[in-house]
Image (cartoon, grey):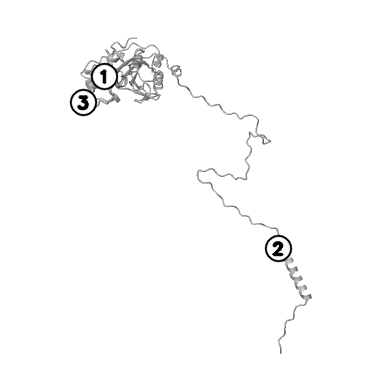
Amino acid sequence: MSPRRNRPMSHTGLRLSIAASVALLTAVVAACSSGPSKQPTFAPPPTSAPAGDEPTLDPTLEASPSPSDSPSGKPSSSPTKRPSPTPSTVKDLAWYTSRLPKFGPLPPPASVNVDAGTSSPLWFKVPTTQKVAFLTIDDGATRHPMALQLLKASGVRITLFLTLQYVEGHTDYFKALQASGAVIENHTITHTSLKGKTYAFQHHEICDAADRLGKLFGRRPTLFRPPYGNYDDTTLKVARECGQKVVFYWTETVDKGKVRYQTSNHTIQPGHIVLMHFRPAYPDDFLAVLTKMKQSGVQPALLEQYVQGSCAGACDG
């Protein structure tokens, strides 16, 4: 028996099959589209600004208008007020002299006899209970142009411990100070530390300086201050031999307009000696010392008037 052969589908059957497939596909599409469509959302990963940097603003965001902007978005016609710059203080001679304190009359000085012994005494302060203190100025390396006018305006008297090598060739500057109330004393020839030096070396620095300063300024010094405050027993012995009645240290110093203390009581006490230098800040230092003396209740007095026999014609006037 021969096998059966599949008969080809008739045209009518083919159309029915296609129609059934289309109907099925339409039903599937309708079923899928009947629910709400949800699109997946993807949040961008968070980013952090590098340490120390400001966070980056979203460029799509618009800046809020500042309160000074007009509602129309047009710039305001009134100018923005800015604070006026504060003018810097001009510290000229008039500025300093207008701030110098005024002092009353000084008490009669009570001088001390220091002639006993083979060595000059060392004073950190003057042994007095009078309400006076003493301004001393060292070296002479910087010659500030306001020094003379400040001294005249202040009406006070001061002691200058001058180093010979700094003042030679500039005697007119220091003679003008001398004529206005300053007294010139001895601070060696070369401003070398004397401690530990030989007798001959110290004798040259102290005695020869006194002789030569005397020739330059018409009065031989009678008081001595060792450079840097460095001294030894030889220094005190040579000072006596050279006619330097007292070797002076100090109690306060001043630099750049600030008074510095070497005692726990931060006031200038009776008998205290203030050390100042000829430096660029001379006007600030001079004003600071006198102001602090006034606040401390003491008056600036002349050192030589408190050492018996040391005036040598310098205390008058």
CB under 8 Å between callouts 1 and 2?
Answer: no
Outermost residue, top direction?
317
Residue situated furthest right in the rendering: 12
From the viewer's perspective, is the residue at label 3 or at label 2 nearer? 3
Q: Nearer the viewer, residue 190 or 22?
A: 190
First of labels 1, 2 by sequence position: 2
Label 3 vs 1, first from the N-terminus: 3
In 3D space, how far apart are the residues under numbered discs 3 and 1 (Cα atoms)?
Answer: 16 Å
At mark 2, the secondary structure is helix
- Label 3 environment density (alpha carbons within 10 Å; few <14, some 14–19, many ≥20): few
> For mark 3, what is the residue?
198
The label on residue 209 is 1
Callout 3 amino acid: Thr
Q: Quadrant of the C terminus?
A: top left
Q: Nearer the viewer, residue 148 or 122?
A: 148
Residue at 40% across, 16% down: 150
Query: Mark 1 or mark 2: which is in front?
Result: 1
Label 2 sits on residue? 32
Tell me, yes or no, if residue 254 can be seen here: yes
Q: CA distance from mark 1 to mark 2?
A: 117 Å
Q: Is residue 207 left or right of residue 71?
A: left
Q: Neighbour class for label 1 at 10 Å: few (<14), some, many (≥20)?
A: many
Q: Amino acid at mark 2?
A: Cys
| Amino acid at circle 1 | Ala
Nearer mark to the viewer, of 3 and 1: 1
Residue 58 located left or right of residue 153 = right
How many numbered marks, from 0 up? 3
